[in-house]
Image (cartoon, helix red, strand yellow):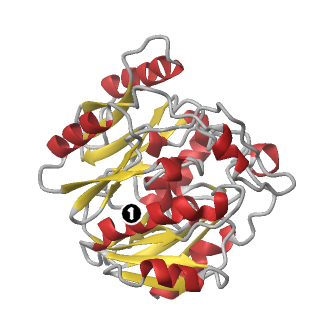
Amino acid sequence: MEVTEKNRTKYRMPGEFEPHEGCVMIWPERPGSWNYGAREAQKAFVKVAEAIGVSEKVYMLVSKAQMENAKNQLGNVSGVTLLECETDDAWARDVGATMVLDEKGAVCGVDWQFNAWGGTFDGLYRNWEKDDRVAAFICRTLGCPCLDARPFVLEGGSIHSDGEGTLIVTEACLLSQGRNPQMSREQIEEQLKYWLGVHKIIWLPCGIYQDETNEHVDNVCAFVRPGEVVLAWTEDETDPQYAMSLADLKVLEQETDAKGRKFKIHKLPIPQKPVCLTQEDVDGFVFEEGEDEREAGERMAASYVNFYISNGGIILPQFGDENDKRAVEILQKCFPERRIYPIDARAIIVGGGNIHCITQQIPGKNI
């Protein structure tokens, strides 16, 4: 849609650190993403749901075929509601509605067009019709208005809001030829400002090395609070991530947010040792025709920035790396009022994303 002052409605995308009504997740089962029948992935999803459920509701979308299995594994987890819904995969952040508040403080869901991270240009699988219906399903289930942002293509992992008018994105993702190639950067900004109520967009050049989403921002940079961010970082100048993070740092150091504040930047290390797929990992996948296949030795886009902020905690991925503990310490200082929940997330990163990617917050009403 063309955005004009006449049709502009004032929505606001709250910061993730603001109060939540709950969180949406999707039970994993896709054989091309979750190896060996998703056994280990499902265990990891249960741990994430348990940690989130301590302080907010969890709505877990589950296919009919997996409902009994999900009930068995999640039946005793506090705060979890199972909802039957067919999906193509389990990335709730990207296929779920992006929740915003309208002028009266009521929750609405923005339904972007989803095309599996690039459509026919460089998408990760050919069929994504079920995923593209998830946002509308969530809005119907929660009883909130569904805002139709189509044909604008966007995933929830490609945006981070401070709740006060500033949005952080990456050029690598939003300017990808697989998203909205017919639109200029200015036209893309226009859509983001309209649907999310932001006034300034910070364009970081890069995301995390080898991120198959075309480098989503939620893997490299996240708001701690307005005016304050964490940035994925490495001191190893031989690592491809060094130049990428350095380019992002230079932008953040030169920019101010929508309120004119300079950014306080916390450098959050990436794992000391690259997290790579093993042959055993690869042997457990079953790929569909046209689906992006995986190879042993492939470096995964592991990052501690891909955490979820719940009402009471920080749900933080861990990789069995020497920097796991350091990440916990840094984020505890950033969020002294919240408990850190370190979760072994290797089974999730094997699927291609991490804890933030499998969660989507629902803000509280009238805040």
Q: Nearer the viewer, residue 309 or 322?
A: 322
Lateral position of residue 203 relative to residue 48, left or right = right
The residue located at (51%, 56%) in the rendering is: 156
Lateral position of residue 291 relative to residue 308, left or right = right
In the structure shown, which secondary structural element does the residue marked by tag 1 occupy?
helix
The residue located at (65%, 56%) in the rendering is: 35
Total marks drawn? 1
The residue located at (12%, 49%) in the rendering is: 336
Residue farthest toward the left in the current orientation of the protein: 337
Does residue 323 sit above or below 168 in this rendering?
above
Lateral position of residue 26 relative to residue 259, left or right = right
Which quadrant holds residue 129?
bottom right
Does residue 298 sit above or below 291 in this rendering?
above
Which quadrant holds residue 214?
top right
User: Is there any visible trace of residue 144 in the rendered image?
Assistant: no
In the picture, which quadrant includes the C terminus?
Answer: bottom left
Q: Which residue is mark 1?
A: 48
In the picture, which quadrant includes the N terminus?
Answer: bottom right
User: Is there any visible trace of residue 248 in the rendered image?
Assistant: yes
Does residue 8 sit above or below 214 in this rendering?
below
- Amino acid type of the residue that numbered disc 1 sits on in the rendered structure: Val
Residue 313: give x, y in percent of width and height.
24, 59
